[in-house]
Image: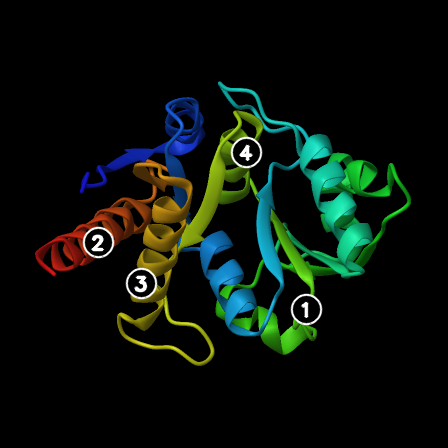
Amino acid sequence: MVRLRVASVTDASGAWEAAKREDLVVIVDVIDMSTTLESALEAGAKAVFGAAPDGIDCPVRVSPYNMGKYVGQLSLADNAEIILAAEPRWAGAKERELKAASFIEGVTQLGAKVAKILPNAGAEIAKLYPLKGRLVVVVSGTGGTAYDAAFNAGGNVTTATIARTANSKGLAPAYAGAERALRQAQEYKKNITVVAASANSWEDVMASHLICQLIQAKIEQEHLH
């Protein structure tokens, strides 16, 4: 049995390079993108995604418009509402809508629509709107951009966090993200790269290393059995 390789990198550029290597890309943005999405999954979201905001300065290609088109197509195919979580976190919905204009334009291209725009609120997201059965997307400058870069480079992308969610504490969210990443990597027959969304966010860097360790421990455990 071939053992999976697990690596850790930083930033959207690292996510893009990992996708080009055809790795499964795991985005870690503790405050708040990947925590928001972990909480959404816990609340029963059908699927979760990230996208870059308008005007982002990124050294690799991103396309929130393409992300919007993809999520819009899923929405129409699955008859699932799209819930958008964006920044500025404490601004009004109009300011968040402007930041996500390209993503929303992609969504509406084929007749889909964004049902609700929420703040990128981390563990609190599920308290703001029912998320069960919905498609949840975070548009943000770090985690959303890293996800966007990996996706538009052709990658399979998921997320993970170490922060607590509404119903999970301690290491439970980290184990959930690590387990999801490993299962997807095994399904797609890919190696894994865990991406700290920003090299300037020490919480992301430390969290990405912990997620790597948990995945590696699970691989070793399965290999022994």
Amino acid at dot 4: Phe
Q: Which mark is residue 151?
A: 4
Q: Earlier in the sequence, mark 1 or mark 2?
A: 1
Quarter occupied by the C terminus: bottom left
Question: Which numbered disc, 4 or 2, marks the residue that appears first in the sequence?
Answer: 4
Q: Residue at x 54, y 42 (%)?
A: 144
Label 4, label 1: how many angstroms apart (C-alpha)?
Answer: 22 Å
* Circle number at residue 209: none
Q: Which amino acid, mark 2?
A: Leu
Earlier residue among tags 4 and 1: 1
Mark 2 and mark 4 in contact (Cβ < 8 Å)?
no
Q: Is residue 162 visible?
A: no
The reply to whether the C-beta atoms of the residues labelled 1 and 2 are less than 8 Å apart is no
SS label for mark 1: loop
Q: Secondary structure at mark 4?
A: helix
Is any atom of residue 117 visible in this view?
A: yes
Task: Verify CB contact (< 8 Å) between mark 3 and mark 2.
Answer: yes
Residue behind mark 2: 210
- Which residue corresponds to mark 1? 133
